[in-house]
Image (cartoon, grey):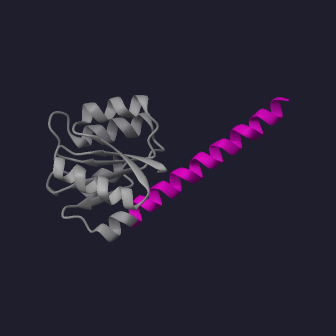
Amino acid sequence: MGHRVLVVDDDEHILSAFGDFLKKERCFMIAAKSAIEALHILEVQHIDLLITDIRLQGQSGIMLLMETHWKNPHLPIIVITGFPDVITESDAKSYGASYFFLKPLDLHKLRNAIRQCIYANNQLQHNNKSTMEIDFSKAS
């Protein structure tokens, strides 16, 4: 399995469904049931994509979105919610979300968003690696 996707939701059924869905996309899912748990995982593991619900126990997904974007502005983030009155798509994107989806999820659109996020992240990592190689060659 290739890309590491952190999925944050306090609903076991949602996490299980994401696990099956992401396995078909050849991704490895790391699950977190809270924003605090997700922030810890983000500190200690390499993650290629964050998918988070907005309504979580304890700290909200909005705070997770903002803090993650502040610490790692290049990490793609997909926000999902069943409560459009909590946050708008434009607000979520202004806080750092790459994509915003309302539940129930359109799996075709979600699949495309995941693929786009992973592709963009791969391109960024490749460009950063190329830049580092160039910088090292200048030091010789």
- Main SS of the magenta part reads helix
91 in the magenta segment: no
Name the residue furthest right.
140
User: Hey, which quadrant is residue 67 in on the image?
Assistant: top left
Q: Residue at x 44, y 41 (%)?
A: 47
Percent across and percent down for residue 129 are: 66, 42
Please tell me whether residue 26 is drawn above or below residue 137 in the rendered image.
below
Percent across and percent down for residue 27 are: 42, 53
Front residue of 17/114: it is 17
Percent across and percent down for residue 104 are: 18, 64
Q: Residue at x 14, y 55 (%)?
A: 83
Query: Is any atom of residue 90 visible in this view?
Result: no
Q: Residue at x 30, y 52 (%)?
A: 19
Q: What is the magenta range? A: 112-140
Query: Is any atom of residue 72 visible in this view?
Result: yes
Q: Residue at x 29, y 38 (%)?
A: 64
Pick the quarter of the image with the C terminus.
top right
Please tell me whether residue 134 is drawn above or below residue 15 in the rendered image.
above
Percent across and percent down for residue 94 are: 35, 50
Please tell me whether residue 66 is drawn above or below residue 90 in the rendered image.
above
136 in the magenta segment: yes
Front residue of 115/89: it is 115
